[in-house]
Image: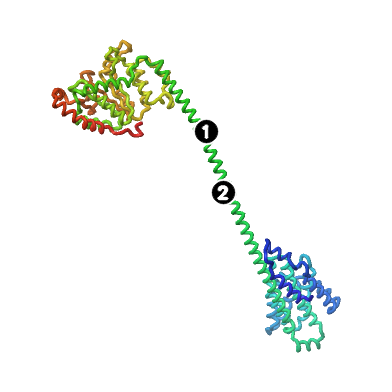
Amino acid sequence: MDLTTREQSSSDALLVLPDSHPAPLVNRLEDGLHSDWWDDPAKEAYDSAIKSLQNELTVEEATWLRSQNSLIDVKGSVDEALKEYQMRSKATKARDWLSKCSSRFMYYGAIFDTFSQHHPEYVSLAWGAMKFLFIAVLNHEELLVEISKTITRIADVLPRIELHSALYPIQRMQEAVSLVYAKIIEFFIEAIKWYKRGKLAQFITSITKPFSLGFKPIIEEVNKRSRLVEELANAASKAEIRDLHVTINGLERTVDQLKGMITALRQQQLQQFQQQQQQQVLYNQSLLAIHSQYKHQFRENQIYRIRETIFPKGLPATDDSLNYCKSMRDRRRQKKPIQLPTLALSTLKSWVMKPASSLLLAQGQGIKTSSLDFAVDFLDIILERGYHVLWALPSTTEEHNSIPSMTTVLQSLISQALTLNPGIVTEGSNPVTTEHFKSATSIHRWLVLFERCISSFPRLFLVIDINLMELAVGDMGNDQEFFTLRDFIEQLSDLVNNKFEKGLKIVIISWRFDTVTSLDAKEIFNEARIFTDMGKRMESLMRQPKFRSVSRRRNQRFAEKFRSSIPLAEVSDL
């Protein structure tokens, strides 16, 4: 099979890609059909050239030709020829074509260097043949022009081959480049044969088949084979694109799988985290429940010990005192319905609404028991509105000559505070303990302890009956301590003015406060003073059945006004 036929077969084979494209397709181009039938065209061209040169050249010429084996050698010869023609005064075609040819040798170098590593003899032969031609025809200007022109035109198609060969260094590309090399060597050998003919043969050939026409097919073949290289590069490029597409599809599938795995892993981790959170919540709830139970038991035990071991056995029950006072109020109301003056309701509402701690004096001016009845009405509404409230009111014990001492009254108030907020004995950095109660051996210490107990309430109402306190301070034999009603009022005033900036509201109920306490009510209470009845004249009118009947009908509306004067407790008040 000759080179032309082999070249056509290779072109057809290189352009046919298999239907399926398992990656990588570029390697399939390298490992494909050519391995069974392809021979190295460069080697065949080299072997053929050696045989031809042995027939055409003398031993000395052949030896010289094979020793001139570098680009520098050839370029040096062409530059010397160009210099010689440049020295001539007349511009010639030879000078122009030699200049163009000299600038294009690097393109041949790119082709020949492909074989330099494994077949340096191929490179040496090509450069040697090229130099031999330039030296041989140096003095034949017309022939020199034709050879320079042909070498230049062949070189013009070589840059693409260099680029494709660098981009796709596969076996098939090497073979395609070998085909180009073979045609270049063929041109050199044919040119040398033409030169070695006799002058007569050259003359006859120049007429029948000029040099430019004789070598035109070779140039066309070089162009054709260079296009073969370009087509192979295009096929390789498409194969690479296909490989890239397959790789990208594979990566996309891999990414999708990884995403699925990551999603599943995240869901698994989320489930594990949620389970751990649930377990932690359950564990924390268990701990809190145990802690709360222990705290509750400890608190109940503390309060039980305080009440059983410290408070006296006969301490009056607070509910009993309030129920007693309610019973007495209801009895009196059946005979004498009592109404507060309108101004008193306005003052009461304003006093309750103000957040600052303060005292309020509620005293009767015509009916002795009106202030106590007011206290019961006020407590009913305060309790209904949801506020915290403590009270010190008379009970049935006073009727049986069992007069409470000041200490007993303070213990009763503290007991009420413990009932409202058992956390007094456990909460805070310094809770009230049994030891504090055991150390309370005087009224002043009980007052300090009372102050500590009520300090935990953000808002607290305290209702005190002065008549009861008068009886308590009069019973000095029990407390063995000098403590007057004046001292008690001053202690309460100190609480609201100095100890508690806001939240503590104390109602003092009395009959003729100034007379009982020998204190100036205006100086202590300022404007926070109300009367709980309308005076003696109203008491006289109440004895008349007709007036009493009208008052009862109005009592319902009055009760609503009284209730509306006290707002509902807010969360911050509890």
Closer to the chain start, of discs 2 and 1, is: 2
Q: Looking at the image, which residue is at 76% across and 88% down?
A: 208
Eyeballing the image, is 371 above or below 244? above
481 left or right, relative to 113:
left
Eyeballing the image, is 288 above or below 516? below
User: Can you name the residue that lies furthest to the right here?
Assistant: 59
Task: Describe the element under mark 1 as helix, strand or loop.
Answer: helix
- For the C terminus, the quadrant is top left
Eyeballing the image, is 500 above or below 488? below
Q: Nearer the viewer, residue 142 or 279?
A: 279
Residue 455: name its quadrant.
top left
Residue type, numbered disc 1: Tyr
Task: Describe the element under mark 2 as helix, strand or loop.
Answer: helix
Q: Position of residue 15 (x, y in %)?
A: 69, 71
Residue of label 1:
283
Residue of label 2:
263
- For the N terminus, the quadrant is bottom right
Residue 408: name its quadrant.
top left
Sort mark 1 into few (<14), some (14-19) or many (20+) by Cα contacts within 10 Å: few
Residue type, numbered disc 2: Thr
Q: Position of residue 94 (x, y in %)?
A: 70, 82
Residue 411 seen in the figure: yes
241 left or right, relative to 271:
right
Q: Position of residue 339 (x, y in %)?
A: 20, 28
Residue 193: name its quadrant.
bottom right
Q: Nearer the viewer, residue 347 or 261?
A: 261
Q: Position of residue 82 (x, y in %)?
A: 71, 78
Sort mark 2 into few (<14), some (14-19) or many (20+) by Cα contacts within 10 Å: few
Mark 2 and mark 1: Cα distance apart in space:
29 Å
Task: Find residue 350 and name its label.
Answer: none
